[in-house]
Image: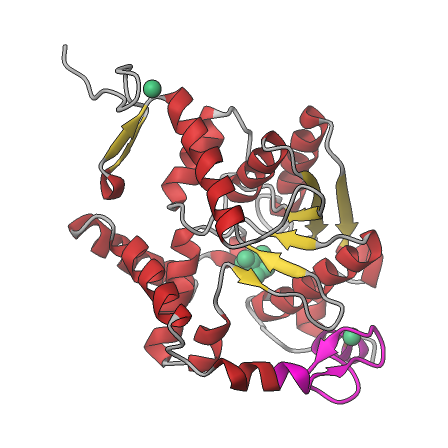
Amino acid sequence: MSYIRCHKCDQHAAMRMKHHRLNLCAEHYIEYIQKQTLRSIKKYRMFTHSERVLVAVSGGKDSLALWDVLLTLGYQADGFYIDLGIDEGLGYSSKSRMMAEQFAQSKGARLTVIDFAGEYGLTIGELAKRTRRGTDKPCSVCGIAKRHTMNAVTQRGDYDVIATGHNLDDEAAVLFSNTLRWDTDMMMRQSPVLEAHHGMPRKVKPFFRFYERETAAYALLRGIDYIQDECPFAEGSRTIELKHLLNQLEDQSAGSKLNFYMNYLKAQEQKFFNRDKDEATRANLNRCLQCGQPTTAEGLCGFCRLLAQSQR
Ligand code: Q46
Ligand code: ZN
Ligand code: ZN
């Protein structure tokens, strides 16, 4: 029987990557993902082996696969998980927390778990309700809260950099959304590396060149147990709609997503946009009177305002 062979060793190919015209067996595929990640880290100067990295872990495939790769490559990578208390329906938070904890244990790696309700006295859902920001979905509040908590943990733990598991599908969907609105401020800020500022650590996305199916295949082939369900509030979101549209494009023409995003980064490098304006905005940021994180507001940052509102 004929089968598709690995380009490196002639074994049965476990993964076909049409956009790269590359088929690889399990062993060579794992090696490929690890090597390519190392390449991105070095090319974009994300971090070095002497820096301490905090991996934002959700319990899903991307973040656990990223943590696995960084540990394999010998980086000082600790994990960080926020228990948002989203347990409506199928117990999303409890399950994802369990996956993160199991992975950390199996690797003997350090995981910091922040129980949001324990830390701030209310769940994300309650915060959204009390501040009337999202009657059916707490996503806008959740985004602010996650960013804030992540910054706080990084400062507390003295980490140099935060790494997230965003993949190409995520990045292309955000770029697509910003392009549809022609939101140049947001577009300008989109990058695999956001430099440190105002005491906030650098933020990096070492998986930005991998398709979602590629990170899923890596997790599977490495035997990583991850939560397959999305957060129940993700259903029907605009990002998911845009991902479907991009998938249709990709089906018709392999490599569309990769070209869309990578060529955008090239345009950015060629100073397609005015970076001075963004730097001026950053230079004029204030510090929150409550927590000290940077904010465009005077007085309290968005998160501390939310908390204050919720306590009224
Ligand atoms: S924002 Fe919204 Fe996500 Fe928060 S409430 Fe769930 S879907 S987890 S990426
Ligand atoms: Zn092979
Ligand atoms: Zn604040």
Residue 279 located within the stretch drawn in magenta: no
Taking the spot 63% from the left edge, 45% from the top edge, the residue there is 57
Q: Is residue 20 above or below residue 104?
A: below
Which quarter of the picture shows residue 101? top right
Q: Which residues are magenta?
A: 281-309
- Which residue is depicted at the point 39% across and 64% down? 265
- Residue 263 horizontal/vertical position (percent): 31, 63
Name the quadrant where ligand 2 sits.
top left
Relative height, residue 56 to residue 286 (above, below): above
Q: Position of residue 178 (x, y in %)?
A: 40, 74
Which of these two is toward me, 195 or 310?
195
The quadrant holding residue 243 is bottom left
Is residue 186 rendered to the left or right of residue 115? left
Q: Quadrant of the C terminus?
A: bottom right
Please provide percent x and percent y for residue 4. 20, 21
Which residue is at the far top? 1
Residue name at image x 40 percent, y 49 percent: 209
Does any portion of residue 5 appear in the rendered image?
Answer: yes
Magenta region includes residue 299: yes
Answer whether residue 121 is visible to the viewer in this image.
Answer: no
Q: Say left or right for 92 vs 244.
A: right
Q: Quadrant of the N terminus?
A: top left
Front-lying residue, 239 or 261: 261
